[in-house]
Structure formats: structure tokens, C-alpha cells
Amino acid sequence: MNWPQFWQYTAANALLGILPAVVGLAISVPIGIACVRWRWLYGPVLSATSVVYAIPSLALFVVLIAYTGLSNLTVIIPLTLFSLCVLVPNVVDGLRSVPEPVRQAATAMGFGTLRRLVQVELPLAVPIVIAGLRIAVVSSISLASVSGLIGVASLGYFFIDGLQRNFNEEIYAAIVAVIGLALACDLILVLARRMLTPWSRKPGGRATVNAEGAQLLQEPAI
Amino acid sequence: MSYFSFAWNWLKSSSQWHGADGIPIRVLQHLGYSGLSLLVATLIALPLGVLIGHFGRGGFLVVNLANAWRAIPTLGLLILMVSLLGFSVLAWLIPLVVLAIPPILVNAYEGVAGVDRDLIDAARGMGMTDWQILRRVEVPVALPLIMLGLRTGAIFIVATATIAAEIGVGGLGRYIIDGLATNNYGEVAGGAALVVVLALLVQFAFVGLRRLFVPAPLRAMARAES
């Protein structure tokens, strides 16, 4: 077993999984804000993201080969698009979860629309947004390994190499590494949420469970 | 040359449309494997999810299962099965079924567990038995989420069945995998186009099924909540 290569590909797989979630978040926040502001926008946006989500990742990877070759972008672009399907609804739900009295109190204190958004609404949306981010990052780390099929460096390489050389330990190690990476990122995000939202540290069991199931629960508009 | 010209050049050649590895056969294979897997997964996950939702026990476990499920690398699971079982039907059927179970299970559970308590009390007050409440109140009200779970499961199966070509399974993924192996980008591009069309058709089929089976007021309710 070639361990230096293994760790190098583990790092590559982490990058291919984390970057799409981060870029996806950067795209989802403005889209989510727009969807809350103009309600009619939300339906078409949800339909568009859920249509993209239905396309198998391998198909999108090989389509992009024609334009971005075997670079990391070929993997990052489709995974970013997939992450929108989880992140946009969670940004919208997060912003909508801000209680109306809180909003009114901020206005009464003289906050303008922008300041209220940045200092009150977005911070209160953090728990639900991070719940979405957890789903996005775990899914994209696992999906990034599919890129081994097109020859982009990721942990998927060891699945295929292990199959071709009948080398089972390699397959086991790569599976464990994918799951370990995903769970590590998940844990970091849970800790980040605790740090960013010190007011919600009291046990609130059921609510967080709901927020984490949000992707499976959200009702697409089409 | 852009992706589209590669795909078009390959698709328009009539030789792709005939014979044992022609496009019609590959489409049927893909739908066959996917349909069988979805059926088995539904038979296991749907009753289980509905019952767990009805009795309200084990819900925490179900939701956490759904979160852990996303971390499983599908390609790794397929190849692991081949290394354990050899190239057989079970080697692709087990992963496809296992991966489709969580979304169906969780949505059925959340759908039934989320039914308004007042509604159930009213049904009980009308003299309905437990079984009647389950069949005539909880399941119909949970139907939008149940359908969403089936759709998510189906999408996942179609995508995984594409990847399963790597372990020698037929279906549309064959074109992508074989084309990559022989450096024939035209075949890869054409195969990807077919996969995209098939996946979108499956998605729209489920939207149609939802229209057919979920009563309009329930659809409107689900939309208002989202």
C-alpha cells in the first residue's frame, strides 16, 4: 500500500468535497435572500435546483471534460450545483425562522434593512444554514470519490485500483477514509455552530433533528 | 469541438440504435435494474417507516441513519460488494437497495410522525381503530412526503446504476465507462446525454405520479408549509 499517495489523494478528496460546499454557500446566501424578499422567485429556483440534483454526477463530470479537461473544476462545478439543492432551501428556511417580533424590535431600534439582515436575521439563521452545510459537505465528499472513474485524483482512485488489482485492503482503506473525512467535517461544523450561536446551547433536541432532516423533508415546488 | 457535437455525432449514427448493446436495450436494462431495486427498497423501507412513525419509537435512530447514509461512497460500496461476492446480481442489487432505503424510510417516518395530533384524536373519537387511523388518516396525510422519499430514492438509484457499469452491469453507464476505457469521447458524451435525459424523465414521472396520487388540497398544504 502506497501511503504517501493515499494521504495525498485523501487531501485532494477533502478539497474536492469542501470547496463545492463553501462556494455553494457563497452562492446560496444571496439567492436565498432574494427568494425571501421576492416570494415568487422561490418556486422556480427550487424547481431548477431539484432538476439539476436529479442528474447523475458521473454524467455531469464527463460532460465537463470537454471544457475543463481532467482538472479539479470538472468535479467542483457539478458538486457545487448539487449543493445548491440543499443550501438554498436551508438559507430560505433559516431567514424565515426569524420571529416577526425580533424583526420588528430591530426596526424599532433603528436598524435599516441591510443592517437588520446582517446583524440580526443572518446570525439567527445560522443553525439552519449550518444544518444544510453539513448535508452539503458530507454528500460532496462522498460524491467526489466518483471522480476516480474519470481519472481525477481522489480516494475513488483506490476503489478502481483495488478492483483491478484484486487488492481489497486498498478498497477498505479508501471507504473508511471517505466516511472518516465526511464525519470529521460534520463534527467541525457542529462545533462551529456551537461557537457561532452561543444562545442556543441549551438542549433543544427535536428542533435540531428537524433542521438536519431538512433536505429530505423539503417539498420541491414542481 | 464542443460536448454537444461529440454527443450528437455519436447519437445520430444508426449503428448505436441496433443490436444487443444498442441504445434501446441499454435503456431497458437501466430501467429494469432501477425499477427492481426501487421495488425491493420500497417493500422494505415503506412499511418500516410508516410503522416507526405510527408508534413514534426509534425516530432519532432513523434521522441519524439518514445523515450517516450520505457519507457512504456509492462507488466504494459497489466495488466492495464485488470484492466480497464476485460479479453477481447481488453485488449490484444490494448497494442499490441499501442506498435507496434511507430516503424512503425517513420521509415515510417524518410524514406519519408529523401528522397533526388533533387529527388523530378526532379519528379516534369517531371510533376508528389503530389500523383504520393508520390506513385512512396517517398514510394519506403523509403521502406528499412518502412520494418525495420515493422520488429521492429513485434519483439515487438511477445515478448509482450508472456508476454500476464499472462493475460490469449493463445499462446506460456502459457507454460512459467503455468510452472512457477506450478513449472514445464521442461514446462517453452520447452516453452522458442519454443518462441525463433518462434521469430527468424519471424525475418528471414522479412529479406526474404525485399529481395522480396526492390529492390537490394536500399538495397545496405541503406547498404552503415549504
Image (cartoon, coloured by chain):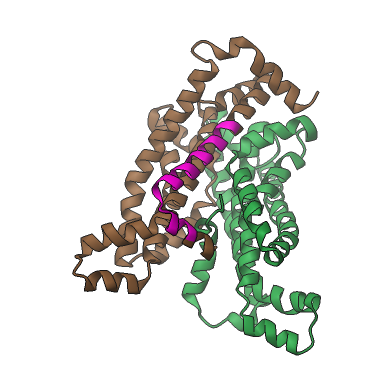
Chain colours: A green, B brown
The foreground one among A51 and A163 is A51
Q: Name the image quarter holding residue B212.
A: top left
Q: Percent from the top left, x then y, of residue B120?
A: 30, 70
Relative vertical location of residue A51 with respect to residue B169 in this rendering, above or below? below
Q: Position of residue B200 (x, y in %)?
A: 57, 37
Q: Main SS type for the magenta part?
A: helix
Residue B181 part of the magenta-drawn span: no
Q: A104 above or below A61?
A: below
Q: Is residue B93 above or below residue B119?
A: above
> In the picture, residue A202 is in which quadrant?
bottom right
Count of numbered tags? 0
- Judge whether residue A10 can be spotted in this image: no
- At horizontal 61% and vertical 25% (from top left) the residue drawn is B191
Image quarter where the N terminus of chain A lies is top right
Write the residue at 68% across / 36% down: A61
Res B42 → quadrant: top left
Q: Residue at coordinates 59% horizontally, 65% vertically from top-left? A: A131
Image spot of residue A70 (x, y percent): 75, 34
Q: Single out the residue that lies furthest toward the front.
A: B216
In front of the other: B75 or B204:
B204
Q: Is residue A109 left or right of residue A134?
A: right
Can residue A9 be seen here?
yes
Residue B199 is one of the magenta-drawn residues: yes
Q: Magenta residues? A: B197-220
Kindly identify the residue that appears in the image at 54 percent across and 19 percent down: B23
- A21 to A5, vertically: above or below: below
